[in-house]
Image (spheres, rainbow, N blue to C red):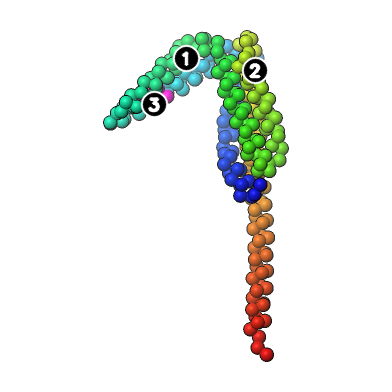
Amino acid sequence: MSNKNKKDRISNYNAGTVIADIVMLLLGLVFFIGTLMGKGDDIAAGFVRIIGGILILVGVFELINFLRIKEKTVFDVIVLAIGSAIAVIGIVFIVNPLPVITVFNFIFGIIVAVYAIVIIFTSVGTLRPSGAKYWWFSLLFGIIALGMGIFIIFFNGATKALTIIIGITLVLGSVGGMANAILASQAKKEFKANSKILEDATFTVDSTTTVEESDGKGEDNVKY
């Protein structure tokens, strides 16, 4: 792969996504440690309520946006209706999170699986072609997280066991995600170092060629 293609692949990867990985890590620790402390059901209910609050904020945002529009169209009304429905769902999540917890494994399993797929594609599609060392490390954690995410989707056990498994899975996934960010950062540094060496070598060759051409012209101008 050419240096330009490597540069493009590395540049397109945003190492700032490590923030999302840190959030996933903290969330995983909360699920794991909290469940061991006997708070598994409370954590699951609390998480559902947080999602409900986010849905309500989305509905409120759509309402404010609708009121700010002077010339309203049918599309704007439809968006408002969807936003209102989302807000109502959010209220249901907050008032009665228990029905949502019954399908908690399916919802969270999908989230974890998508998260793991992103890690896998980043390690194989970005880090490996760019020449990053140990790209397989994040790939390994991504595959494990994907497998556990699929397992969570079809899990039919107790909520306590589910929250522990979710916590472990999030921790493993976040390790893979942070490994991607670290490896991408190292690849960027190596690329810059190699580019600097290449530029210095090119400059040296150009300078030598210029001097030789100047000397040659000087010899041609000598009259006998």
Residue type at numbered disc 3: Phe
Q: Quadrant of residue 92?
A: top left
Query: Please, what is the three-letter code of the amino acid marked with disc 2?
Result: Phe
Rendered location of residue 55, percent (x, y): 45, 21
Instruction: Check the image and report above or below for 223 versus 132.
Output: below
Asked whether residue 71 is drawn in magenta, I would say: no
Q: Secondary structure at mark 3?
A: helix
Q: Is residue 155 above or below residue 211?
A: above
Q: Who's the residue at 65% across and 66% down the image?
A: 206
Instruction: Tell me the number on the disc at residue 61.
Output: 3
Label 2 packing within 10 angstroms: few (<14), some (14-19), many (20+): some
Question: Is 62 part of what is drawn in magenta?
Answer: yes
Q: Is 135 left or right of 30, judged from the image as shown?
A: right
User: Circle 2 sits on which residue?
Assistant: 151
Which SS does the magenta portion mostly show? Answer: helix
Residue 159 visible, this angle = yes
Q: Secondary structure at mark 2?
A: helix
Distance Cα–Cα, label 3 vs label 2: 36 Å
- Spatial distance from mark 1 to mark 2, Cα to Cα? 25 Å
For disc 3, the neighbor class at 10 Å (few under 14, some 14 to 19, many from 20) is some
What segment carries the magenta color? 58-63
> Can you identify the residue that label 1 sits on?
93
* 1 and 2 marks in contact (CB < 8 Å): no
**Residue 129 drawn at (x, y percent):** 66, 41
Instruction: Tell me if residue 166 comes above or below residue 10 in the rendering.
Output: above
Name the amino acid type tagged 1. Phe
Give residue 197's position: percent from left, percent from top: 68, 56
Q: Earlier in the sequence, mark 3 or mark 1?
A: 3
Secondary structure of residue under mark 1: helix
Residue in the image at 65% along x and 53% along y = 195
Please name the residue shown 65% across and 17% down the image: 151
Q: Nearer the viewer, residue 216 or 25?
A: 216
